[in-house]
Amino acid sequence: MLIIFCGIPSVGKTLIARRLAVELEKRGRPTFVVGSDDIRRLVPAHEEEFDPGRESFIKETTLHLVDYLLGKGKTVISDDTNYYNAMRRDLIEIARRNNTDYAIVYVYAPVEYALKWNRERGEPIPPEVIQRIHERFDVPGKKYRWDQPIVSIDSSETRLEEAVKTILQKLDELKPQGEVKRFSDSGLGRSEEIDRVTRRIVGRVLAEGGDERLARRLSSLRRSFVKEALERNLSLAQVESEFTERVRSVLNGEAH
Amino acid sequence: MLIIFCGIPSVGKTLIARRLAVELEKRGRPTFVVGSDDIRRLVPAHEEEFDPGRESFIKETTLHLVDYLLGKGKTVISDDTNYYNAMRRDLIEIARRNNTDYAIVYVYAPVEYALKWNRERGEPIPPEVIQRIHERFDVPGKKYRWDQPIVSIDSSETRLEEAVKTILQKLDELKPQGEVKRFSDSGLGRSEEIDRVTRRIVGRVLAEGGDERLARRLSSLRRSFVKEALERNLSLAQVESEFTERVRSVLNGEAH
């Protein structure tokens, strides 16, 4: 089974995920907690300088490891912000490929708490990053049925033990009632999803200002990219990052 | 390229490996440092109780990740004790499958230093473990040409910067002289290697005391296991751990 945690940085996901893993293991389920931070840690140069290309490879490797562990019959907790539903969708696709169930757990708190907790541990994450992810966060289940969390935890009002107990209960309830969500429930086609993700990126750029010429240019770029993405069988996270880069390079070209 | 570090625990491998990775990255080589500790960390239950089955899966996953990263063209530093040459041999096999070169780096120090450094960081490793690995350590290059390190670093007498500089020099020297070692140089067949590993295990058990009946029993167990290992295409590390378990269960049976 794949348990997908989502929530802004520094909201307490890792703490809950790791305690949950210990409890699942006690119930006989070998459980791994995997986040992109764990892969990032393997690249010592990351601490010296940030590189977007490397970052995208790190995300790819994280998904690969999740895939591998699910394929070996392990329970995996994805411990990442997973803040766009496209990211959750990519994870769900991996669960489906491995013929296993998934469950989404949403951990939230007022952003001021996350900023405070981050300060208390010496500000490992730049506050702007927390703020930005907070603003862009796709609250799970708002748009799609497949994206519905089994539980939402307000970590500013819930003790760790209690949070873990609630998640365990919800996981237990899933099976007997046959309510475990399957990817096929979503009813969304691949090309629709890619369409939606790329449209949103273009929309955001144009909302920040842009003339008709730029709109036409981005629209044609988008159409050809959607075709390419389908052919190359890109994941939604890859679509998100590659298309953002292409749009960026068009904008840079315009500026010159 | 795969850089295989080996050395007893707490001898300074990680420190050197991570600094080396930063330097390689500066020279344009994306570099990952991967050890079984990094995978073990993904299993929170590990801190609560040790499980040999899990341990063997963790080693398998570590090798898989090394394989994946080499396949993506990354430079990988294996940061593990790698204390049997069978372990180094498994890694070399992975490098060969990915058509890439390898280099062995041996980091050593008097065992008293390792014990002292381990004490200084709050004894994360049980001292018996360090002592045991020290006693069993196959010094690289003693038996096989393919196992020859490009450099041996005495970490009790070498400053970090100096160690990294020496390794970088040795790595630079490799290429122009076409001296990079290839697996095919070893001239050892797979079944010979499995034979050797299993014989050694039986030898050790009998050396600790055992009658003729036990010798016959282990010998027949060994022969059938060698066949099975070849059929199942087990890695040498798997041979090592699975055969050790089987021998152990025979011994337990004898004791009853």
Image (cartoon, coloured by chain):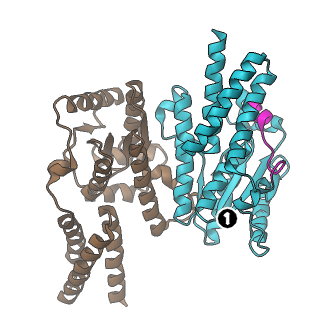
Chain colours: A brown, B cyan
Q: Specify whether A19 is left or right of A181.
A: right
Residue positioned 77% across, 51% down in the render: B106
Q: Is residue B207 magenta?
A: no
For the C terminus of chain B, the quadrant is top right
Residue positioned 30% across, 42% down in the render: A100
Residue positioned 81% across, 57% down in the render: B151
Amino acid type, callout 1 = Asp
How packed mark 1 is, by other alpha carbons closer than 10 Å (few <14, some 14-19, many 20 or more), is some
A160 and B239: which is toward the camera: B239
Q: Is residue B137 magenta?
A: yes
x then y, percent, for residue A214:
23, 86
Is any atom of residue A7 visible in this view?
A: no
x then y, percent, for residue B115:
77, 34
Q: Specify whether B254 is left or right of B155.
A: left
Residue positioned 65% across, 25% down in the render: B247
Q: Quick check: B2 above or below B50?
A: below
Q: Quick check: B230 above or below A127?
A: above
The residue identified by callout 1 is B101
Q: Specify whether B127 is left or right of A24.
A: right
For the N terminus of chain B, the quadrant is bottom right
x then y, percent, for residue B25:
61, 67
Chain under numbered label 1: B
x then y, percent, for residue B81:
69, 43
Question: What residue span does the magenta drawing correspond to?
Answer: B131-144
How many numbered discs, if any?
1
